[in-house]
Each structure stands twice: as C-alpha cells, then as structure tokens.
C-alpha cells in the first residue's frame, strides 16, 4: 500500500491534526528510529526501505548496521539478489536497536520473526518487496509485517496499516522536540488470533466466507488477508455481497438528498440518484460492486480527478465500507449518528480489526482516515513537524492503550 494514497484527500501527511498547514520545517536531515523487540523470539529482523528524497528519490535500503545507506544499482536480470546485507538484527526480547534514516518518501519498516526476508531487484532498479498475494513469493510462509512512514523537510508521518493484511502487532510512539508524545497501540500478542476468531464467528452468523481470509501454516494462524486481497486470491469471494445495501442506498437517495462534507475548499456538496447515477455537484457515480467497495480504487472509485472528485471518492468509499449511508444524510457521518459497521452488510474485517486494536486505531481500508470534523481519528497515524524519536515496537508484549 502506498502511504500517500491512504490519506483520504485530507492531506494529513502535510497538516497538523487541527487541519492547519505545517509551516515550520522539521529540523535535521536524519532521524532516529528505536526498533523494539517485544516478541518472545531471539530472531527478529527489521528492514527499512523508501525513496531518498535528498538523493533524487533514489531507491533506498538501510544496511544491516542500521546507519549506512544502500542505493542499489540497476541489475542486468529480473529477480537479482541484493548486493548488501539489509537485515537488521533486533536482538533478544526486550531489547531496542536504534537506526538512523535520511529523508525518505514512501518508507516502510518491515519486521519478520524467526526467518529473514528476501528482497530482490529488477532492472530500474525496482525493488521486489515481500508479497502476501503471490503464492510463489519466497516470503509467503514467513511471519512478517510492516509500518509505513514519510520523513521529509516538513514532518514525519507514520502509521500502522491493515489495508493488506493482519499479522504482527506493531505499535508506534512518536516523541517530539517539544516534549509531546503520540502513541498508537496496535494489538496485544494474540491480536492475529483474535482477528481470525472474529472472522470465523462472522462467517457462522452470515454464511459468507470470511474465514477464507485466514491463512494458516502448520495449524497456526499466519495472517488474515483484507477482503480486497482475499478477492485478489479468489475472484469468487464475496461476489454480490454488498449489492442489497447498495440498492437500499440508491433507493434512499433517489427520494432525498445526500450531502458530502469534502472537508476542503469545496465545502459541502449535495446530490441525489437520477437515472441510475448518483450525481453530486458536477460528478456522477454508478453503483459500486463489492470489489469496488473493498478496494476503494476500482469502478466508480477509480477516477480521483478533478480533486473535488477525489474528495467525494474518499468519503463515499469510507461510508460504504462502514455502512453509514442509510443512517445519516451527510458523510462523513457525525459520531453520534454514524454507528459504523452496525448494518449487517458491512466491512466486517475492518470492524473486527478496529475492535482488536487496544485503542481502536489502524488503517483497515484505504480511506480509513476519513472522519467527521469533530470525530475521533481511526487511522493509526502519528505526525509531527519536529520529531525527535520514533519508537516502533513489534510483538505486542507490554502493548498498552
């Protein structure tokens, strides 16, 4: 998942939480990350990747010493090995390893337990990162996960993500130069098992194949895929699931008006269904399919230009995933009437993921950062214009809200 695609057109990665533009440049061109092993394993590996902003956006990996940049050159062949060791060993449970990074865009901090990960290079150079949807990927049987970040001259923005899958508990704690602290809790050590149990329980309730999202290895839960990735693996999964809800939404807004708060310069845009199309201001939307809703990026949600359409797409996609369109005539729905995930047809994966996280926060679908102006953030993000240290803890031991 691309970090900057997940900010719901609210431009959070360039703003403070109150919506004011960040004007003060972050100090320094490097930043320390404290990587904490909160697992029970002595074999935990970390990897840092991204695009080096101060080096023409060159592909970047951090070497195993946690300090030295590695800028791979373009290989002659597809699937070439890295020429440097980029596996940062975290040490025994309870230990902390501090690494130093330059300004990076689209950054990721990968973690794996018990086995190192395999990264490959294609001509470009293009980095072949671990995949959970490619059965032939060399990392397919390994327990691994990642957090995302961008660190530039304006600020550090980081988040935990479940847009693609759930596997390892990851928590973030951002300390600023001013002494402020922001914390994202993640899950307890049994977070994955609790998500998988929730998926099985939901399947028992509605008969849908939610348990097909669970990937096991040797009788143990390995990861839980998002519905979007589940559909990628099996195109028959959830076919037609959202259609009854979509039909109700179309019927409701053929009778009355829907208001969309763009939370930007376009203000509140209004529209209704006519001739089978949901027409809002100058934009028109056909009925989304189940796959469109889970992906947030296909069908009527594929085009996000002009910018005001992008704002509408983000808010419509979020409202469909949370199933809040029938109980509020304005979206994002106000917290007191929103009742996210309460309709029987909803993104139960996202519901379960939020319920398992100790503070209820974390991206569970691409526009999960969309929230009402007076609503509580759900996205699992931390950001500051003058960061001092980012702590990234993997494993969930000692996790707290």
Image: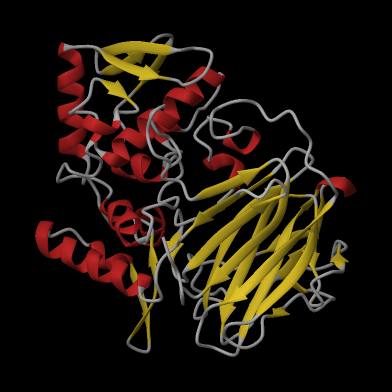
What color scheme is it? secondary structure
Q: In this view, does 178 lie above or below 306?
A: below
- Where residue 283 sits: x, y (%)? 42, 14
State left or right for residue 321 relative to residue 142: left
Q: Where is residue 251 in the image (x, y as percent from the top left)?
A: 15, 21
Q: Quadrant of residue 272?
A: top left
Residue that appears at 58% across and 82% down: 94
**Residue nearest the viewer, comparing 142 with 154:** 154
Residue 99 or 141: which is nearer the viewer?
Answer: 99
Total marks shown come to 0
Q: Is residue 372 left or right of residue 114?
A: left
Question: Quadrant of the rendered structure where residue 175 is?
Answer: bottom right
In x, y percent, where is residue 50?
A: 73, 56
Q: In this view, does 227 lie to the left or right of 173?
A: left
Question: Which residue is nearer to you in this view: 236 or 364?
Answer: 364
- Residue depicted at 15% across the width and 37% down the height: 244
Q: Where is residue 8 in the image (x, y as percent from the top left)?
A: 49, 34
- Judge whether residue 78 can be spotted in this image: no
Q: Judge whether residue 358 can be spotted in this image.
A: yes
Q: Quadrant of the C terminus?
A: bottom left
View extreme (front): residue: 179
Residue drawn at (34%, 11%) of the image: 270
Is residue 63 shown above or below 389?
below
């Amino acid at each position: 998942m691309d970090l900057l695609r997940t900010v719901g057109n609210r431009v959070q990665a360039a703003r403070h939480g109150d919506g004011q533009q960040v004007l003060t440049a972050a100090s320094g061109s490097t930043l320390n990350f404290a990587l904490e092993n909160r697992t029970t394993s002595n074999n935990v590996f970390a990897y840092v990747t991204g695009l080096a902003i101060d080096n023409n956006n060159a592909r970047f990996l951090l070497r195993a010493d946690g300090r030295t940049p590695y800028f791979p050159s373009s290989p002659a062949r597809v699937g070439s090995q890295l020429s440097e060791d980029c596996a940062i060993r975290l040490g025994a449970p309870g230990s902390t390893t501090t690494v130093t990074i330059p300004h990076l865009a689209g950054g990721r901090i990968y973690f794996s337990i018990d086995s190192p990960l395999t990264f490959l290079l294609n001509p470009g150079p293009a980095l072949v990162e671990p995949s959970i949807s490619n059965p032939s990927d060399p990392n397919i049987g390994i327990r691994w996960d990642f957090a995302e970040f961008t660190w530039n001259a304006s600020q550090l923005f980081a988040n935990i993500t479940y847009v693609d899958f759930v596997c390892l508990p990851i928590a973030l704690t951002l300390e600023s130069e001013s002494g402020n602290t922001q914390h994202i809790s993640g899950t307890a050590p049994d977070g994955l098992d609790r998500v998988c149990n929730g998926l099985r329980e939901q399947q028992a309730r509605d008969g849908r194949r939610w348990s097909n999202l669970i990937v096991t290895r040797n009788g143990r839960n390995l990861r839980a895929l998002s519905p979007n990735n589940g559909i990628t693996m099996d195109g028959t999964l959830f076919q037609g699931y959202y259609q009854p809800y979509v039909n109700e939404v179309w019927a409701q807004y053929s009778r009355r008006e829907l208001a969309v708060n763009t939370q930007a310069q376009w203000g509140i845009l209004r529209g209704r269904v006519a001739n089978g199309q949901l027409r809002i201001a100058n934009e028109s939307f056909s009925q989304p399919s189940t796959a469109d809703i889970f992906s947030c990026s296909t069908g009527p949600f594929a085009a996000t230009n002009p910018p005001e359409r992008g704002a509408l797409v983000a808010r419509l996609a979020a409202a469909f995933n949370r199933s809040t369109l029938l109980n509020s005539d304005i979206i994002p729905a106000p917290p007191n009437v929103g009742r996210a995930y309460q309709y029987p047809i909803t993104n139960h994966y996202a519901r379960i993921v939020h319920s398992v996280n100790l503070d209820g926060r974390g991206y569970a679908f691409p526009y999960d950062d969309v929230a009402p102006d007076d609503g509580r953030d759900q996205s699992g993000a931390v950001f500051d214009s003058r960061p001092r240290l980012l702590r990234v803890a993997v494993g969930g031991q000692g996790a707290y809200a």
